[in-house]
Image (cartoon, rainbow, N blue to C red):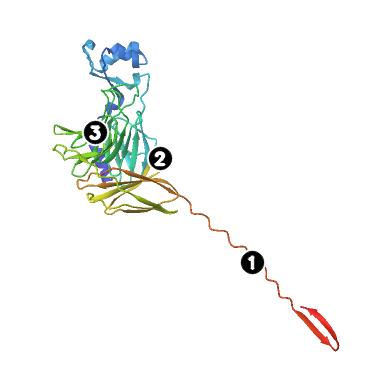
Amino acid sequence: MRVWLGIAALLWLGLFPAAQASEDWHYTLRPGDSLWKVCLRFAQQPEACWRQLADHNHLTDPHALRPGDSLRVSIDWLKEKPIPARLEAVTGEVMLYPAAGGEPRPVSTGDTVQFGDALETGADGSARIHFADQSDVSIKPSSLLVVTRYRRFLDQPGERTELRLERGNIRNRVTPLTSDEASFEVYTPGAVAAVRGTEYYLGVDGAETTRNEVISGQVDVGARGTTREVEGGFATLAQVDESPMAPVPLLPAPTVELTVSHTGAVAVWPTQAEADHYWVEWYQQPDNRLLGQQRLEAGHWQQDLPVGEYRLLVRAVDGHGLRGHENWRDIVVTPAPPPPPPEPPAPPEEKPRWDLWVFVGAAAMLLAL
């Protein structure tokens, strides 16, 4: 419980985003916009909205607004309600610390996440956040992620998604962004990663080293005034108070030979000279629920599995702790065939027939036994 209470204290001290962000939608003004046009487009009652909007944003001269300025719009005024982010594939211990205050609580699949909420996974916990634009963030075990802001309206440009990874690991699958004003950014203690549609991993270890591995697309990793453009198939890392290192290629995906039985699976792969160790994760299908993860020093993995469908992920890890290309393998464990039916009982043996001839004097008698 010390970990949970420690994070709750951070929330109360204001080190994480404030709760009031959850009540407003932030709209970025476009050329030709005015308070009246914004209200006419989005508000349930446009006639009253524009005055309320000016007061809500403390505007003394609404005509001084310019494209690029941000307006806070109360969600209660909107005719289109925002689409919340939802949790999927929750496994093990996952705690939510509400931005609005209150006691931390465990979460389950289907729960919603608000602006400023923090999610912490235990050693056996994991979860996936699904956003309105179909982007996903998978939170790995022993991680702490703050959901600062996320896109909630599908047809509005300029909506931002901002997350803060305090520690642990996440895997992001970001839907390509169609607006120049839109962004998807993840902050860590030592860097910021900004993307415009990609799949990538981000991790923060105990030494507050940020590691970024890009599977596809591009991620811009910035720290200490230096930004590295990391393309798919490359990775970088950034120490606290240091610039990110130049991107390096990901190690090749291991060539995995998989053997599946009726009770589990065995995977083997050749040793890679550049690999320091290997990282393995296995998931239950069809909801892609993380069942386990393991660091391996050699190319051998074995796991008992009940009947069902699974996916196995194997990656080589270099000396910097950067995990390489992915090798995903499907596993289907089928029931063992039923035992063969018992042999039918043998027919009863027929007793041998004996013929006995009895001679009595000159006569003979045949007795059948």
Q: Nearest the camera: 255 or 3?
A: 255
Residue type at mark 2?
Asp
Secondary structure of residue under mark 1: loop
Q: Residue furthest right?
A: 362
Q: Helix, strand, or loop for circle 3?
A: strand
Q: Nearer the viewer, residue 150 or 20?
A: 150
Q: In the image, is residue 79 above or below residue 299?
A: above
Quarter of the N terminus within the rendering:
top left
Tell me the SS state at disc 2: loop
The residue type indicated by label 3 comes to: Val
Find residue 318 and report its horizontal and vertical position in percent: 22, 47
**Where, quadrant-wise, is the C terminus in this rendering?**
bottom right
Determine crowd level at label 3: few under 14, some 14-19, many 20+ residues with C-alpha closer than 10 A: many
User: Can I make out residue 212 in this image?
Assistant: no
User: Residue beneath label 1, please?
Assistant: 346
Instruction: Kindly identify which numbered label has been placed on residue 219.
Output: 3
